[in-house]
Amino acid sequence: MDTGESSTEPKSPAAEQAPPPRRGLRRWAMDTRPLRIPAYRRLWSSTIVTAVGSQLTAVAVPKQIYDITGSSAWVGAASLAGLLPLIVFALWGGAVADTMDRRKLLLITNTGIAVTSVLFWLQAVTGLDSVAALMVLLAVQQAFWGLNAPARNASIARLVPGEQLPAANALGSTVMQTGQVVGPLLAGALIPLIGLPELYLIDALALCVTVWAVHRLPSLPPLASTVARRAGVREIAEGFRYISAHKVLLLSFLADIIAMVFGMPRALFPQLASQTYAPYGEGFALGLLFAAIPIGAVVGGLFSGAFSRARRHGWMVIGAVVAWGVAITGFGLSGSLWLAVVFLAVAGVADMVSMVFRGAILLSAATDEMRGRMQGVFTVVVAGGPRLADVLHGTAGSVFGARTAVAGGGLLVVAVMLGLAFAVPALRRYRV
């Protein structure tokens, strides 16, 4: 790897083997080789269950808050209530993941999330109707998730050979994106049939499957060469210093910030559905707009076979972010709903490519003793970027109009990403 430092990690025998040649259409089909590794297969299988289950709770909480208050402002406040714990505990969780057995940390945090889902169910089934209780539970749930995500993502590099990291990331990202499509649709179908409390209960049961799968993982302690540390503010700050000293890591974070903050237009979907695409039916248009990007990401994942053959990971990130910006610009200029959906789906494909290769860079360019903290920052960036975009696009949409704000944001993504790529060459020079 072109990182300027030698790796002290043990090499898997599979890492020395060249990937088998794939011919014809199989060259483009999803690379499933990581699933041949039992430990990764267990981790991935648990994701299938929780990807859908977590979306049931993600729909149920705002629905219950709106039913209690009749106010969208309270729904937005609840979202912000979960953001601060997520940021704090993701950064701290990254430091913790670098100091203890990651399997043990996953067991603790998944159990905590499951208990929180049971508490969501109890407050709903008893008719508590307390917004304060829901916001507290949401904050606790997001805190556990912030602790869980860095350990989960950092563990992948210990379970699969280095050349299979893009394939492993594609498999995981595809499942999560599929959950974002199937979960809300399933929640919408189940609420009239079984009610809100049962959605929380289904999520809790799904998390029990996750705990069982994590229990069967091998132990993942810090490597022998890693010096034992505590997980405090100094260690978190050390992670940020590590990022600033490794430009390729810093640029991978900046690439996602550029794409999401300037180019994620979801805050304007309701306005576009009610104004530009109203002739198609406002509810129908809104549903399509929200589903289009995840559907595109799933399609990109299903045809991700070429990812494993790519070696210029930096250029793949740059190209994906630029493609995202171009697609978002096309979406902003589209007067037709169907054309808009196509552009959003293309943006979803680009987002999948960006996620896969940014994840591969983080796992391959960082040493194992720093991977938890890198994934903690990654979690904060992924969660915080779209929320900042909601504020930026919502303000720009009211000032300039929705379509102008979307198209302008897409063009800004292209200009800023290309400018950064050529001003700082570390990302475009990075290759495996």
Image: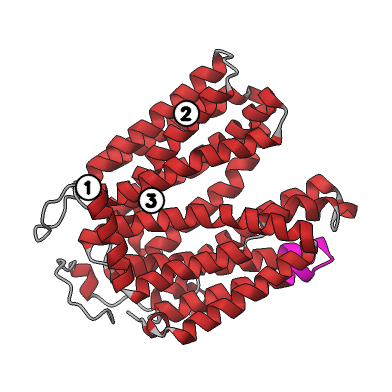
Q: Quadrant of residue 294?
A: bottom right
- x and y, in percent, of residue 21 in the image: 37, 79
Looking at the rendering, the stretch of residues picked out in magenta corresponds to 330-341
Tell me what residue is drawn at x 84 percent, y 66 percent: 335
Alpha carbon distance from label 1 to label 3? 27 Å
Q: Quadrant of the C terminus?
A: bottom left
When the figure is inspected, residue 130 is found, relative to residue 400, above or below; the finding is above
Foreground residue among 115 and 232: 232
Q: Secondary structure at mark 1?
A: loop
Tag 1–tag 2 contact (CB < 8 Å): no
When the figure is inspected, residue 3 is found, relative to residue 254, above or below; the finding is below
Disc 2: which residue: 137
Foreground residue among 170 and 359: 359
In this view, the mark in front (1 or 2): 1
Residue 304 appears in the rendering: no
Q: Say which amino acid is labelled 3.
A: Trp
**Residue 282 belongs to the span the image colors magenta:** no
Foreground residue among 314 and 404: 404
In this view, the mark in front (1 or 3): 1
Disc 3: which residue: 44
